[in-house]
Amino acid sequence: DSGVTQTPKHLITATGQRVTLRCSPRSGDLSVYWYQQSLDQGLQFLIQYYNGEERAKGNILERFSAQQFPDLHSELNLSSLELGDSALYFCASSSPVAKNIQYFGAGTRLSVL
Amino acid sequence: AQKVTQAQTEISVVEKEDVTLDCVYETRDTTYYLFWYKQPPSGELVFLIRRNSFDEQNEISGRYSWNFQKSTSSFNFTITASQVVDSAVYFCALSEFRGSSNTGKLIFGQGTTLQVKP
């Protein structure tokens, strides 16, 4: 168990809808990262937050947004969903105390029908 | 640009065979980190090892060993005496160094699917 919790584990929704994925980092970790894993694109970095502030952005679509709250949990919001957004979404967290290694949650599998 | 290449898409071995997973990376940074992660059939990503660019010592952990060669930009992973439980997708990843507060994003290779048959 990595200590990173992601909910829900599975999400099935329809095109055009909006969903929110939630991530609770390991206790004390200030950095949270979001990644998308799809068959055609592989594992790709979406966005990073550090102590509530956006730190780095990858190829995240404008329809996607994220935030990190004062209690350090993070949410990834996906809107106007398309079939191609079906993927496994991972959250990871890291801390200097743990050598800045990114530990991953179990992921949220999103299916857009 | 940073890039990680895992040329082996799939490898199949019989239990107890040794197997090496190749990883080649590209970066212009002088300071960076290299990682290996394992993704078993259950889907989670499990951290295996981190190596920084200044440390070229090979590392061994039980049946696992890693060979980092800066001269060839490679960070290969060997499993000795493979077991069925080693069946998984293995990812090599690269990240830039961002200072003591955090590391940069992970850039992953495409992964190597290892199947260990009994």
Image (cartoon, coloured by chain):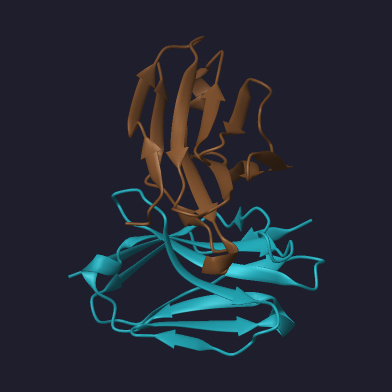
Chain colours: A brown, B cyan
Query: In the rendered image of this protein, does residue A93 appear above or below residue B100?
Result: above
In this rendering, would B94 be left or right of B85? Answer: right
| Image position, residue B73 (x, y; %) | 69, 76
Give the camera-side residue of A91 and B53. A91
Q: Nearer the viewer, residue B60 or B117?
A: B60
Tell me the quarter of the image containing the N terminus of chain A. Answer: bottom left
Q: Residue furthest front?
A: A70
- Where does residue A35 sit, x and y in percent of width and height? 55, 42
Q: Provide residue B78's location: percent of width, then percent of height.
A: 43, 80
Q: Residue at x 61, y 69 (%)?
A: B34
Residue B6 in view: no
In the depicted structure, whether residue A51 falls above or below residue A61: below
Between residues B29 and B83, which one lies in front from this camera angle? B29
Q: Quadrant of residue A11?
A: top left
Residue at the (42%, 12%) spot, across then down: A14
Task: Name, please, the residue furthest toward the left.
Answer: B118
Place of residue A49 in the rendered image (x, y in percent of width and height, measured from the top left): 64, 43
Q: Residue furthest bottom?
A: B57
Q: Residue at x 49, y 38 (%)?
A: A73
Residue shown at the point (22%, 68%) measured from the top left: B84
Specify the quadrant that holds the C terminus of chain A. Answer: top left
Residue A17 position (above or below residue B19): above
Confirm whether residue B116 shows in the render: yes
